[in-house]
Structures are given as structure tokens and as C-alpha cells.
Amino acid sequence: MRRKFWYLVGILILSVAVVGPTIYAHRLANDGSSMSLAESRDGPSGSDHEGKGRVTPALPPAADQGCRVYVAVVGKGKQVLFGPAQVSLSSGQKWGATALGALDATGLEYHLAYGNKFVDMVAGQANQGQWGWMYKVNDQVIWKPAVDVEVKPGDKIIWWYSQDRSPGPIWSELSK
């Protein structure tokens, strides 16, 4: 009887070791942290706000314009992928009036990692090694997760793919 018990315990541990990573990988693949233009504003159920991208419609009516900011996205090789353009953010949107909300409002596809705190891909351009996506607000590089950085009306947010140690593009250069 004791031997059967230990065999069962061993089989249970082996089952968890084999099936656990598969379940975890499946959950990661289906957690919705890959964003695209085709996905709906709030996800399929209307209440899933974690990691879903959305299409930003034309600016809302004047009564509901929220926080209007300027955004530019510069990819590899200094290719301008979006803007500079003005977008409207509100606390009712998925990422609210944050630097990540500004990226989301561009409609570009992006991917988040580390609990939706780290942008590791924008418009098909993924981080590689020590190079990757950074952002700044009003020409100041911010070293916090973009979802934690609230923006104010009129702020200028630049997302860029950093391939060197420079502080990135300057707003006045982008808006020429």
C-alpha cells in the first residue's frame, strides 16, 4: 500500500512537470498582450482590458476630448512610423492618460512583457539584445514603466527604437 502511494505521488509530480509548462505557455500565448489594429477597443467581452490593443477612432466630440497629447513613434533607422500627431486620451480608456496610452492611441501594433510593464515590440520591430524601445515625455527620457507615467494635456511623447546610447530624437526635429 505504501509503495502504491509513492508511485501515485511520483506520477502526480511527473504529470505536473510535463503538463504545467504547456498550460503556462498556452496562457501566455492567449493572454492578449499582442496588440493589433484589428482587435476591438475593449476585447471580445467588453471587460478584458489587460493587454488588448485597440483602434483609436477619430477624435471624440468636444465634450469628451479628455487629455489631448502629441505622439510620435520612430522605428529602426529613424523611420517615422507615426506622427507627430495629436491624440486624445481619457481615464476611461484601457491605459488611461499615460505614456502607454499614447502609444496605444497611435493604432500601431505593439507587444508588452513583464506584466504589461515593458514594451518589447512596436510595428513588428522587436527589441534585440540591449537595443529596443524607449520613450520620453517633453524631451525627457523616463525610466519608469510607461503605464505608470501620467501625461498632461499638451505633453509631447516620443517612442523610439534605440540602437545607440543617445537620448533619442528631439520633438522639434520631428515636427519640422
Image: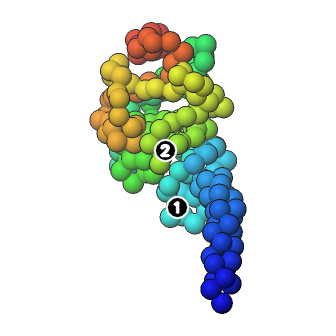
- Tell me the SS state at disc 1: loop
- Quadrant holding the N terminus: bottom right
Which residue corresponds to the image point at 61% horizontal and 13% vertical from the top-left? 77
Q: Nearer the viewer, mark 1 or mark 2?
A: 2
Provide the residue designation for mark 1.
48
Left or right of 70? Residue 20 is right
Residue 38 vs 150, above or below: the answer is below
Q: Earlier in the sequence, mark 1 or mark 2?
A: 1
Residue 90 vs 137, above or below: the answer is below
Provide the residue designation for mark 2.
114
Q: Separation of disc 1 and disc 2 at Cα?
A: 18 Å
- Tell me the SS state at disc 2: loop
Q: Nearer the viewer, residue 141 or 98?
A: 141
For residue 40, what is the image quadrant?
bottom right
Q: Nearer the viewer, residue 166 or 15?
A: 15
Residue type at mark 2? Answer: Tyr
Residue 17 is tagged as none
Which residue corresponds to the image point at 40% horizontal and 37% vertical from the top-left? 146
Residue 119: percent from left, percent from top = 51, 36
Task: Kindly tell me whether residue 145 is visible in this rendering.
Answer: yes
Which residue corresponds to the image point at 45% horizontal and 12% vertical from the top-left? 165
Residue 112: percent from left, percent from top = 53, 42
Residue type at mark 1? Answer: Asp
Residue 83: percent from left, percent from top = 52, 24
Residue 26 vs 115, above or below: the answer is below
Task: Kindly tell me whether residue 59 is visible in this rendering.
Answer: no
